[in-house]
Image (cartoon, rainbow, N blue to C red):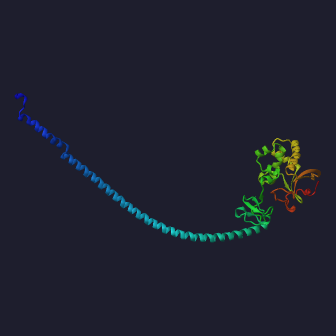
Amino acid sequence: MPADHPTETDALPANQHQQQSPANQHDQSQPTLEQLHDRLDQLEAELERKDDRIAQLEANRDQLTDTVDDLQGRVAELEAETSRLEDNCDRLESLADAARKKSNANKERIAELQSRELEKGAHLRADTVDEHAIDVADGRLERITKDDGNAYYRLPESADPLERGGDVTLAYGDLLPIQQLARMDEDMRRSAANSLPTRLAAKLWQARADPSVGDNPWKHGCKNTREYVTASDLKHWIRRQEQGISDSYAKKLVSRIIDAILELSKNRLAVRRTTERKNGLEYIERRLILPDDAAIPGDSSRSQDPSTDRDSDRNPETTDVHS
């Protein structure tokens, strides 16, 4: 029947469509011209970046090459400088060795001279003496400090014939108890001694030894007496030192102070009774005396010549001293 069989004309478009479909699909899978242009632009841009990178690396290479050249030149300079310094070092070592030998020779000469001077009694400044290089009898040196505040070396107990630097400053422990107390201030003395006679004994000794104190009842003696203070002068001195003390109590303190100063001086001082004359009358008075030969640490003073003694004319009885 005509309706069931299609004609050739009707079937043709379908066949043609079936034949063109693969071609159409192939055209769609290929890049378009515009895409190719974009890809070309990308490749050219990437090529430019690589060219720039290569140019930068070449510049860095050239810079590194220059740096290496500079470093090689600097190394050559340092090697030359090192060689020069090594030569100079060898020269300086030779000079130093010669100076060391000369210094050792001079040190030996100085040590020998100092040793001889010390054996003669010299006192040498400690900062100029190498005590390990000194060669003296028994190998004994004594380090002392003098009034000038400097330290010295000497042979034990030797006196300096030139008397440089003043007297020897003794250590605190080398002093007599009366000297130790006399060196204290009022507060320290009050803490160390709770007895009024002891404190006044220390102050009395301080007045004798320290001219700056002012109120000094001691007088210069003569013959075998270096200095002395009478009981009557001591009584008046006590009343000047301690305000409000009666005359009778001051008399009692005189005996106690004398006892204290004898004990604290380890009996370096002594008490003598003398005959005094006043208004034509004779009386016996005690004197606290410092003998001329008393061994007082650090005290090198001696009594004045009787012809110039300030008290010899005023008190001619001082020569009549007996126990």
Tell me which residue sits at (76%, 45%) in the image.
188
Nearest the eye: 313 or 69: 69
What residue is at 11 percent from the left and 36 percent from the top?
Answer: 14
Percent across and percent down for residue 37 are 20, 48
Residue toward you, 135 or 42: 42
Q: Is residue 296 above or below residue 73?
A: above
- Report whether 306 appears left or right of 43: right
**Horizontal and vertical percent position of residue 130:** 71, 64
Q: Residue at x 85, y 47 (%)?
A: 236
Between residues 160 and 104, which one lies in front from this camera angle? 104
Residue found at the very far left of the displayed protein:
2
> Can you give x and y, in whole percent of width and height, for residue 109 in the image?
71, 70
Task: Look at the image and tell me whether residue 76 can be seen.
Answer: yes
Q: Is residue 91 above or below residue 301?
A: below
Q: Quadrant of residue 147?
A: bottom right
Compare residues 213 and 10 and report the one nearer the observer: 10
Q: How many marks?
A: 0
Spot occupied by residue 169 in the image (x, y as percentages of width and height): 77, 57
Quarter of the image where the N terminus is located: top left
Which residue does the image show at 43% across and 65% down from the upper left?
A: 72
Relative horizontal placement of residue 197, taking residue 93 as reference (left or right): right
